[in-house]
Amino acid sequence: MTEDRTVVHVDEFLPYPPARVWRALVDPDMLSAWFMPTDFAPRVGHRFTFRTQPIPATRFSGTVQCEVLDVRPEVLLCYTWADAGNPDGLASTVTWTLHPEGRGTRLFLEHRGFDPDDPIQQLSRTIMSGGWRSHVVRRLAEFLVEQDQDQDQESPASLR
């Protein structure tokens, strides 16, 4: 089977109910804590940015401009993803889909829109593919664990 060079797919099981995972994806303070600083709001049409370190090799400015395209609470979140510093570069979409699975959530991430004939976009896809899998989803899982630990510490001993 030929690899689709226009998309990155990630499939991850998280041992938390969809409501917990959803909140980490849409609460701007939480999202800023585990992903990137942002002014996100879960409202179709809302324009927001993510800010991180530039990557000169891919001509990435470090600022991602986004617009919310679809919100279905605890099920699906979709937004555009474009480099603010390179308006002629990658224009793509990121879609998070949540499915209840046992006592947790199967989280699917799809980042779509890479030009298979553009070497810079393919380098970006390679970097993002590894980043989504090894950094972003891992950081989300760690953040959810930290939230559990914080709640445990705030609970009175008699309730533990």
Image: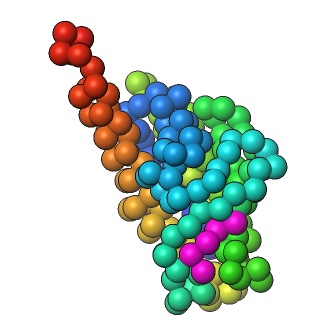
Q: Judge by depth and name the residue closer to the eye, 68 or 78.
A: 68
- The tally of labels here is 0
Magenta span main SS? strand
Task: Please tell me whether residue 113 is drawn above or below residue 34 in the rendered image.
Answer: below
Q: Residue at x 60, y 87 (%)?
A: 59
Q: Quadrant of residue 8?
A: bottom right
Q: Residue at x 41, y 31 (%)?
A: 16
Q: Position of residue 134 (x, y in %)?
A: 38, 62
Task: Give, as a single range, the part of the protein colored magenta.
Answer: 61-65
- Would residue 42 appear left or right of 99 to someone viewing this image? right
| Residue 143 can be seen, yes or no | yes
Residue most extreme to the left: 157
Q: Quadrant of residue 154?
A: top left
Task: Please tell me whether residue 40 is drawn above or below residue 149 in the rendered image.
Answer: below
> In the rendered image, which quarter contains the C terminus?
top left
Q: Residue at x 51, y 60 (%)?
A: 36
| Residue 110 can be seen, yes or no | no
Q: Judge by depth and name the residue closer to the eye, 112 or 58.
A: 58
Q: Judge by depth and name the residue closer to the eye, 106 or 17.
A: 17
Q: Position of residue 80 (x, y in %)?
A: 72, 60
Q: Judge by depth and name the residue closer to the eye, 103 or 83.
A: 83
Instruction: Indicate the colouring scheme.
Output: rainbow
Q: Residue at x 70, y 35 (%)?
A: 72
